[in-house]
Amino acid sequence: MKRFGFLALLSVLLALPVRGQQPPAPPTPPAPVALSIVNAQPAFKSLIDLMPGGTVSPDAAFLWDVYPPVGVESVANGSHFTFTAPAGQYLVTLRSIDWTAKKISQATLTVTIGSVPPNPNPPGPGPQPQPGPGPAPIAAAGFRVLMVYDPATVNQLPQSQLDALNSTKIRAYLNAKCVAGSDGKTPEWRIWKAGLDASTAPQLWQDAFKRKRDSLPWIVISTGKSGFEGPLPKTEADTLTLLQKFGG
Amino acid sequence: MPLQPGEFLIDDSNFQQHAKNALIDGHHMFRGWRPRDFGAKPVGSLAFAPAFNLPLIPRSEWSDRIKEMEGTQTRISDMVLQAGIPSKNQQQTNYCWCNAVVTAMETLHCVAGDPYENLSPASAAAQITGFQNVGGNGIDAVEFIAQRGLNNVHEWPANAISRQYATAANAQSAAKRKLLQWYDLNVGSRQIFDEIMTCLFYRMPVPVGLGWWHHEVCLCDPVETSPGQFGTRFRNSWGDGYGSNGFAVLNESKSIPNDATAPYLEMTTP
């Protein structure tokens, strides 16, 4: 994977605007750094502002996470956190642990590094994407579907998309169309949360779960011969239409 | 509110007739919830269990959201019933507090489309209690399952309180079925019901310990009990003979918990 020379520096002490930095002397001139905050929180000043109450103890310890982790190299130094990563969107999670108060708080924000293609699924009414078939993301024969969403940002999803993720209509369709798993009965579809531990799942699903995702929620559709990978459509109807293009 | 056949509403007018052990299909059903020690385990103090911090969904949106969930059949109960996941049945164990958490875990697997695996509440509860048939609370169950996992009922029968199952092989297998993260809800706060409803709108099941019942159940759906009045649909651990396939409804005041967690991230079914 080509590594972009982008460096994101986040700090709980940093006031707006959050800035990106270029690493010293990159081997080739990088494209302009575009580190932007797309979290919907207004008046964002730092991750601390996203904590419940907007404050943490001065004695608090901090845990940082970046998702997806593929290609990410990071250095955590207390309240300062630096990471480098290929261009894309990343979910940064900060947990503060206040040992005195025995309290753990959490804040998240989405960080965009580099130039990210415009969102093909902007909120609100409008034409939905009409994806064509691509190579099969899952090599095994048969109709399989994986949807992935982020439980930490589930509150940012429109209800219509939440409905799509939890639709019994879509589940009934998938139950009817997907091939059976290794147990001979469980239909081969999964709707997983980013961050879950799939290490005990069949290798096929582990591999599908590890595939690159440009955003969340995300859908992977495979017939074994062709397929689609992209943002999950915004509604149950659009999701079903997309599935039917491959599953019949 | 559209009640399912066999389903009932527990509210301030009738809760006393429910606040006891029950006879379901000829079998006595026990309870067993005991208060959480908030001094030893304050809200948000456990690893991987931050205090609930999602933005609350305002009440002004609840009615419309509930109608949409009902209309599109996208409630947790819809998914669980579609998949044919049976209720847990604690029988004469005092392990409601673990059954409710295991109900939440099985629900998460169902929502994820994972293969159904009948998990054993006793594989955690018996070890937590030192193989005693005594009560407990959900946070202890959640903590144990996060650290050591659960067995399925083939490895450890659902209600077996026996050291014979506490083998190294079962411990190794249980480690494949752990909870990874959960929210610790702010019990005692004025917004606790709003936190519960927000979780349920996001399809996160919420095991709750109910002091008035001395019982723990798993809340699954937000409901509007009458125009502008809200409650929760819960799944009990008294088998499918209770209510409608194990489901019944609590009004808001009876939904207020004495402890509450919302598991949301787990290992996939092995």
Image (tube, coloured by chain):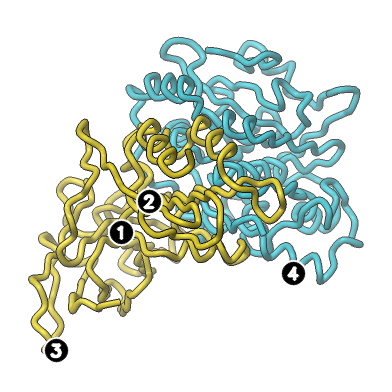
Quadrant of the rendered image containing residue B245: top right
Provide residue B189's location: percent of width, then percent of height: 45, 37
> In 3D space, how far apart are the residues under numbered discs 1 and 4 (Cα atoms)?
36 Å
**Three-letter amino acid code at the position of disc 2:** Trp
Q: Are marks 2 and 4 on the same chain?
A: no
- Crowding near pointer 3: few (<14 within 10 Å), some, many (20+)? few
Amino acid under label 4?
A: Gln
Relative height, residue B80 to residue A229 (above, below): above
Which of the chains bears the disc numbered 2?
Answer: A
Image point (82%, 33%), residue name: B30
Q: Where residue B196 appears, x then y in whole percent?
A: 48, 35
Q: Quick one: SS at disc 3?
A: loop
Image position, residue B153 (x, y; %): 81, 51
Could you say which is closer to the camera, residue B19 or residue A41? A41
Classify 10 Å Cα crowding around label 1: few (below 14), some (14-19), many (20 and above).
some
The residue located at (41%, 22%) in the rendering is B68
Q: Is mark 2 in CB contact (under 8 Å) with mark 1?
A: yes
Tell me what residue is drawn at x 60 percent, y 14 percent.
Answer: B3
Q: Name the residue under label 2.
A: A218
The earlier-in-sequence mark between 3 and 2 is 3
Mark 4 lies on residue: B172
Q: Mark 4 lies on which chain?
A: B
Which colour represents chain A? yellow
Task: Write down which chain is painted cyan.
Answer: B
Residue B148's image quarter? Answer: bottom right
Q: Residue A214 carries which label?
A: 1
Q: Label 3: chain?
A: A
Is label 1 in a helix, a strand or a loop?
A: loop
**In screen coordinates, is B187 left or right of A32?**
right
